[in-house]
Image (cartoon, rainbow, N blue to C red):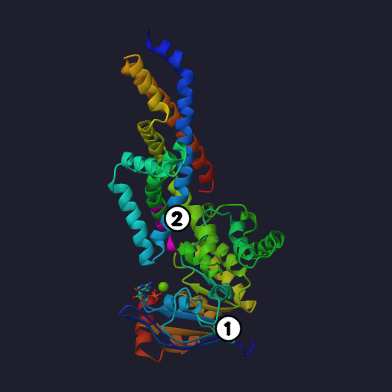
Amino acid sequence: MDLFTKFIDTYPVFLKGMLLTFQLSIVSIFIAIFIGLFFAFLKISKVKALERIADIYIFLVRGTPLVVQIFIFYFGLTSINMPDFWAVVLGLAFHNGAYIAEIFRGAIQSIDNGQLEAGRSLGMTMGLAMSRIILPQAIRRALPPLGNQFIIALKDSSLASFIGMYELFNVATTYGSVEFDYMSYLLIVAVYYLVLVFFFSIIVRMIEKRMASSD
Amino acid sequence: MSDFIMIKVEKLNKSFGNLHVLKDIDMTVKDSEVVCLIGASGSGKSTLLRCLNYLEFKDSGLVIIGGEQIEKETHDLNKVRARVGMVFQHFNLFPHKTVIENVIEAPIYVKKISKEKAIIEAKALLKKVGLSDKENVYPSKLSGGQKQRVAIARALAMKPEIMLFDEPTSALDPELVGEVLATMKELAEEGMTMIVVTHEMGFAREVADWAVYMHEGRIVEVGHPKELFSNPKEKRTKNFLDSVL
Ligand SMILES: Nc1ncnc2c1ncn2[C@@H]1O[C@H](COP(=O)(O)OP(=O)(O)O)[C@@H](O)[C@H]1O
Ligand SMILES: [Mg+2]
């Protein structure tokens, strides 16, 4: 049986896996953005205790393997009856939040201080100047590295296979072991990932283009 | 010109760490007066302006704006800033907003006036600074002189009692300086109280009611611009004027 027939025979199952991969990554990234923003604000708060909290969080995430983090979330959260899907999503969000926090922090700090001063000199509160002046510019600047992080998150979601979620990678290895043909299914799953990543990149580029229209 | 005192500064001091930047500054500016502030780079001119609208906090001394003594403890400083317009050397326009959006932003979100009203007022201001045709353009498409005129319109949109200008023409190509000074002159003629840090001596002579020379954080000499520039009493003032003229 050649690769193409295998592809045709298995695509309904792979598409389901792709959907799960897509859901895992989209939902976890969505949550990670809020976690990231939150910790980015702690980092730039100029309040030592808050900065320290953010540092510890980032240290923990960077200093431990993602697969360990996912397992800790999985066993921790399913023991309090959280569904598998959400346990994995929160594990991924916890992980990506740290990287996204650093992306946002860098982007916010890259905005010229004159922007904040201009806003404040017009009577804006710190919060208003942040939300109306600084963040819109920072988010624009953060988009390319964020897009990059999204793609990493998408590929990292393959680790969910270790706890038995039938996302793309698990589908591939299951077919591989049942049919004693890992190579074919790994090549097939690589194509699915490429398609997903390609699709993601296009969306990110579209958003970037729309936001860049002012420059 | 009335005798109402718009700004009064008494014994104002400000340090950054060990650096004592403003030393016992005293200054009184009446309604509709235009004051030019001159002095070498690093003499504390910007810091003085920034203390007047509380972008920096004074260490000690009094700042009285429109008859009210302003203190961190008793005043909402955001409201105070809204009353004192500021124009920066590098314009600091919001690059993600069009010209008119730059102008209506604070009236809508700080003063909470309706968008319709803000737009009508912004259009009038843009007309006044000669930029009616640039309403819907982003700042990146403007020349430096146009940017600074938008920045002036943006500050005026808050209907400030006082306007502070921190070297408004220093970042401009020489051929663009005139249009900004003309706008400022018009504003002065309308009776706006203004403190202007500038080295445009021609403007100072023509428009300013008096000039202040600052040196190392102190006001060294005050006088009518023509008098101060041609007949400085202090040696330090003379040395400075010789170096810039
Ligand atoms: N935020 C700050 N932190 C530390 N030093 C500052 C700060 N702002 C200004 N200074 C210092 O204060 C002095 C006066 O600066 P400034 O008011 O900008 O002078 P000018 O506008 O007359 O050139 C300079 O030595 C400058 O380096
Ligand atoms: Mg200065």
Q: Nearer the viewer, residue B89 or A88?
A: A88
Cα separation, mark 2 vs mark 1, equals 47 Å
Mark 2 chain: A
Q: Identify the element where label 1 is drawn.
A: loop
Which quadrant of the structure image shows residue B61?
bottom left
Q: Residue at x 31, y 14 (%)?
A: A180
Callout 1 crowding tier (Cα within 10 Å): few <14, some 14–19, many ≥20: many
Residues at marks 2 and 1 on the same chain:
no
- Point out the stretch of residues depicted in magenta: A106-113
Q: Which residue is the site of mark 2?
A: A38
Question: Of the residues shown, which amino acid type is indicated by label 2?
Answer: Phe
| Residue name at image x 43 percent, y 79 percent | B38
Q: Can see residue B172?
A: no
B89 to the left or right of B163:
left
Which is closer to the viewer, label 2 or label 1? 2
List the single residue furthest toward the top.
A1
Count of numbered tags:
2
Q: Could you tell me the amino acid type at mark 1?
A: Glu
Q: Is residue A105 left or right of residue B151?
A: left
Give the labeled residue for mark 1.
B33
As for residue B118 lying within the magenta part, the answer is: no
Q: Determine the main secondary structure of the stretch shown in magenta.
A: helix
